[in-house]
Amino acid sequence: MQRLSGLDASFLYLETSSQVLHVCGLITLDGSTIPGGYSFAKLKQRLAERVLLIPAFRRKLHNPLWNLSHPVWVEDEEFDLDHHVHRVAVPAPADRTELAEMCAHIAGQQLDRAHPLWQLYVIEGLADGEIAVLLKMHHASVDGVSGASLITYLAGLEPDAPPPDISAAERRNPGVPARLELFRSGVLHFAKRPAELARLLPDMLELVPRWLGKSLHGKGMPMPFTAPRTSLNGTITGHRSVAFAQLGLDEIKTIKNAFGVTVNDVVLALVAGALREFLESRGELPDDPLVATVPVSVHDRTERDHGSNKVSAFFASLPTHLADPAARVFFLAEANRLSKDHHDDIHADMLQDWAQFSAATMFGLAVRAYSALRLAEKHPVVHNLVISNVPGPPMPLYLLGARITGLYPLGPVFHGAGLNITVLSNAGKVHVGLLGAKELVQDLWPLADALPEALAQLLKATPAS
């Protein structure tokens, strides 16, 4: 039996038609590299070969009334690729704006929980013979790292790369458990909760005052509910806006080496510079730094082997209040050092352990009430946006025979924080995906186009220049 972890299940419980909690990957492809040329039938056949080998694409939720705990994953015995693969087109020759509008429309639609929680859209009609693929997977099934890994399973290092080598034992998901087995497992899980709470509570009671103390004394990450309010922070609907940008990894490394900071410091400095220009153009640049939630992978530190999502997060100050690009880098280097030290006070598995207590009915009612009452606009801002930095494969990749020219991750947005910026590196490029709540930020292209300019400003401000 493969039960979802509490953290995985939380993404199901917190989802509504306005707060959709899947992740997307926009992949642009050079169709001319496909041996024998592109055709939708050929691409779909190559995809089918791989899906049959990769169990994550064929598992669906099983959550009957007699299940007293989180849902379980089971093999979809009636799996049909036609439920998941779709062919759409934009008016040719479409530009980036029309592609982004199509992706935004798809990104705002919920996945059908009666089937495996993913969809793949092949988008034709792009200029220069390009093809795009939008892969959508529920956050209950993947996090940033595992999502990137799944894409590499579909891809290869050559146009005619063979399917991944996965043993027969690893290809199959568990079957539907017997009613008594599922009921007994749920009762056991429920009965363990008091002991689990008794184990976790002392550490939490000891951590909270120490954690708050560091924040209050300026020795750690910023406190939640201290972010300045902007138009990005409000109640969201299911409508989305999308944009994307591509930057040179070598240029980012040049800045990193010149300032003696990390790649993540430079990425956050670029985002801060772009956000400063974006908010200033809207006449709403706050005097205080923005606060971003930065998800952190704990795949290499976790002691839990259960669940798809192995993440934690910290709050980061974004120095949008500083006009000097170099000052923003130095600010972030110190602020991130303090935030990471502060974050390391929290055990890697704390979020996963506490998420085990999540309850579907309570979470669902709470999110719906929060949205209906528009509470995100009535209390101090928790955080302004989400920024993720996901490491990708360093070598060029071919997806189903076509060379990947762009790999743009698009993360979810939440009530109160209507912007997500996710960064992924691949083959010497840094691919930036921007997804927003459309009512809060209708046009993301000015922000996307500000990123190359922010990079140019940082290169000009490097100590070596």
Image (cartoon, rainbow, N blue to C red):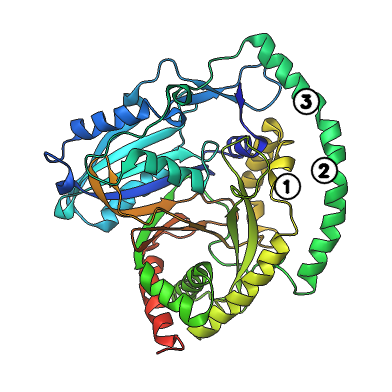
In which quadrant of the rendered image does the C terminus lie? Answer: bottom left
Name the residue at 31% across, 38% down.
121
Which structural element holds mark 2?
A: helix
* Mark 2 to mark 3 CA distance (whole Å): 16 Å
Indicate the position of residue 240 as horizontal and vertical percent values.
Answer: 43, 50
Q: As displayed, is residue 88 above or below residue 441?
A: above
Looking at the image, is mark 3 or mark 1 nearer the viewer? 1
Identity, as a three-letter code, of the amino acid under mark 3: Phe
Indicate the position of residue 455 as horizontal and vertical percent values.
Answer: 40, 76
Label 2, residues with CA under 10 Å away: few <14, some 14-19, many ≥20? some
* Mark 1 to mark 2 CA distance (whole Å): 8 Å
Indicate the position of residue 335 as horizontal and vertical percent values.
Answer: 64, 73
- Say left or right for 132 vs 436: left
Mark earlier in primary sequence (1, 2): 2
Name the residue at 52% across, 42% down.
21
Which structural element holds mark 3?
A: helix
Question: Is residue 165 visible to the viewer in this orientation of the structure?
Answer: yes
User: What residue is disc 2 on?
Assistant: 200
Q: Which mark is residue 190?
A: 3
Looking at the image, is mark 2 or mark 3 nearer the viewer? 2
Find out whether the residues at labels 2 and 3 contact each other: C-beta distance under 8 Å: no
User: What residue is disc 1 on?
Assistant: 350
Identity, as a three-letter code, of the amino acid under mark 2: Leu
Mark earlier in primary sequence (2, 3): 3
Q: How many marks?
A: 3
Question: Is residue 234 visible to the viewer in this orientation of the structure?
Answer: no
Label 1, residues with CA under 10 Å away: few <14, some 14-19, many ≥20? some
Find out whether the residues at labels 1 and 2 contact each other: C-beta distance under 8 Å: yes
In which quadrant of the rendered image does the N terminus lie? Answer: top right
Which structural element holds mark 1?
A: helix
Q: Quadrant of residue 406?
A: bottom left
Name the residue at 38% across, 67% down.
249
